[in-house]
Image (tube, rainbow, N blue to C red):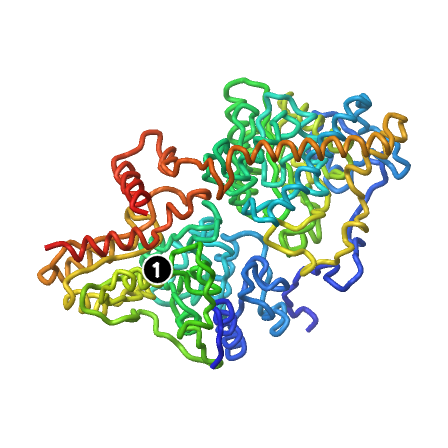
Amino acid sequence: MPSKSRLHVPKTPARPGEAPNFSYLELSPAGAVQRPEAGARVRDIPALADELVRVLDDKHQAVGPWNPRLDPAELQIALRHMLVTRVFDDRMQRIQRSGKISFYMRSFGEEAVSVAMAMALRPGDMLFPSYRNQGLHVVRGRPIVDLMCQLLSNTRDMCKGRQLPVMYHWREGRIFSISGNLATQFPQAVGWAMAAAIKGQDDVAVSWLGEGSSAEADFHHALLFASVYKAPVILNVVNNQWAISTFQGHAGGERRSFAARGPGYGIAGVRVDGNDFLAVHAVTQWAAERARTGHGPTLIEHVTYRAAAHSTSDDPARYRPKEDYQDWPLGDPIERLKGHLIALGEWSEERHQALTAELEAHVVASWKEAVSHGTLTEPPRLDPHLMFEDVFKEMPPHLQKQAAEMRSELERG
Amino acid sequence: MAQRNMIHALNSAMDIMLGRDPSVVVLGEDVGYFGGVFRCTEGLQRKYGEHRVLDTPISEGGIIAAAIGMAVNGLRPVAEIQFADYIYPGYDQIVSELARLRYRSAGEFFAPVTVRTPSGGGIRGGQTHSQSPEALFAHVAGLKVVMPSNPYDAKGLLIASIEDDDPVIFFEPKRIYNGPFDGEPDKPAVPWSAHPKGEVPDGHYTVPIGKAEIVRSGNDLTIVTYGTMVHVSEATARKLGLDAEIIDVRTMVPLDTDTICSSVARTGRCVIVHEATRFAGFGAELSATIQEECFWNLQAPIVRVAGWDTPYPHAFEWEYFPGQARVAKALKTVMEAA
């Protein structure tokens, strides 16, 4: 009787004290994956969901049909955007440790996902981010002092003190409000895209979530609606391998790629090297063209690695090998783009150091300005009355009464 | 006997039940190898294996639904939802399925699932890590709803919940995981080791579901409260020098109406205190029940103290939280009424 069932528990490749192990990772050589027409039928391009689109090879050359052939000046801007994101993240992490902000989440190792995509999209495209997409704000030109004011819940906080740090929004920059609950934005992006199609606009909607969050039902709602209505939307699974302590096998990544869920729903699926700026840029352009020409949605899986903790509330040394990131087979997105620019003769270590120093000074100066608008604990402080505003468009009587009660409570001390 | 904080007490309850009953399983996000983001399940997977303590996908609907299926097949699942604020993707499975399975199948099927979830504010968690949604579950016919206020009760109530053949939604006030909190955030934290209810027996015991506890006897008025607010209420009454009778509800469903109403009938005055939003909060049920049972004994209108009817704000945590000032005002109002 060999058929006795036995509960399968996905294996985690390496835990603390063990050597990093990335033997599970299916890689394609740079330049090896075919680039179909953007209007290709889903059933004709199933391989895109299993292979790995890569452009930058080990010698820092851009190779193959997905090479977006970007101008070196644009690549230098990309490097700057990624680097400022990282410098900002590092500084905010340290500031959280000092107690000035209550919480933080870095995007260390995943900078190319946000930066390359935002650069490949149009300003009119609507972005529905997760909490590790700060690079979107950077590319769209939001001053980092504005982000810092949100982190501080101070008098210039765009959320008026109501949200945890990093839960930004920016209506003018077409970046949606971050919920804090997982995956909720994914089907909302599809609805936005459906509205764009109803109204005859050629803007697309773009959303991101982690591979861990793809376990939520909202992920499946998004794929179903996107497929049924052929919505002009780009749905991104940022597979950074870890959901806090839980390896991606527990989200269903053990036997098949996350991108492969697309074709199951009748949606184009593309698996891309998320640490390869050029590959992410090229795949985004392809998906955006597909959406804008009426060929519907694309599900992109970005294979990357969460190089830092999930947030300032966890210590990854408790659940994975400390040396993991230095052994990650796809390298670091900033180092790889930098290497490419140097190989092109368009960059140097000296320029890189100078840029890093410039950006660090910029972040320090921005922080100085941000704290001048107050902190969680130091004046000037937001008026607590703001707590009662925006619950509804007009404040109903019971909230007016409670607001008055709060005022007298504060006056009595 | 050992000094335990609430986390260790809960861990001990699950440890004992996993050891005693092979049908008990624990499942949830990060509960296995990592031991839970609040460390309530620390060491349990190592001790009982990956088939008894399961790391799950991030899918609250899936966690609850799978727990129901496991329970129908004879297991006794203890599901952790990482924060009560994340429970809503599982709400349909809880309300439409878990709560009604026994009823709709005329008792042929039932699902003894315990859903543990940290709730409440006071930890700078903003609107997605601070909610107190107990009323949303107390309103659903077929769910037992529990919230302990100290380590002793946490362990005894959790064991009772796991052993119960009905579904239990078990709220853990996370602000008091490590020590009682009297509502004053600037004071140094107090550990449970300094509190009599931090004394927790090592072995198996239960605290019965459906029984409130008089945590302080008194004659001036009755304070009906639960969770973190038990401690805020005690501190406030002490400061005002009131001889308050303080009742820790402990179980919202089924509600111990007898203990609550016989106290209010005797004192004639009542303040209800909870952290959750006021409008249609569980305090409304308490107030209505007490009014129905004790109307002719009341010497003053019942007053409710609660969180404001807004989402839980990050920056204004202490202006939002119903601290000692708000409780004191209510106590004075009720005492000064003719």
Residues B29 and B242: in front is: B242
Chain on which label 1 sits: B
Q: Residue furthest top?
A: A200
Residue B207, compared with residue B83, is above or below; it is below
Residues A268 and A151: in front is: A151
Tag 1 residue: B232
Q: Residue type at mark 1?
A: Val
Residues B305 and A411: in front is: A411
Evaluate whether residue B301 shows in this view. Answer: yes
**What x and y, as percent, mark residue B236?**
30, 60
Could you tell me which residue is drawn at 49 percent across and 54 percent down?
B83
Residue B91, compared with residue B209, is above or below; it is above
Judge from the rendering whether residue A136 lies leftward or rightward of residue A327; answer left or right.
left
> How many other residues sit within 10 Å of disc 1, few (<14), some (14-19) or many (≥20)?
many
Q: What quarter of the picture does the C terminus of chain B occupy?
A: bottom left
At mark 1, the secondary structure is helix
Judge from the rendering whether residue A348 lies leftward or rightward of residue B315; answer left or right.
right
Residue A130 falls in image quadrant: top right
Question: Count of labels shown?
Answer: 1
**What x and y, as percent, mark residue B174?**
46, 59
**What x and y, as percent, mark residue B314?**
46, 44
Residue B209 falls in image quadrant: bottom left
Evaluate whether residue A63 shows in this view. Answer: no
Could you tell me which residue is drawn at 54 percent across and 17 percent down?
A200
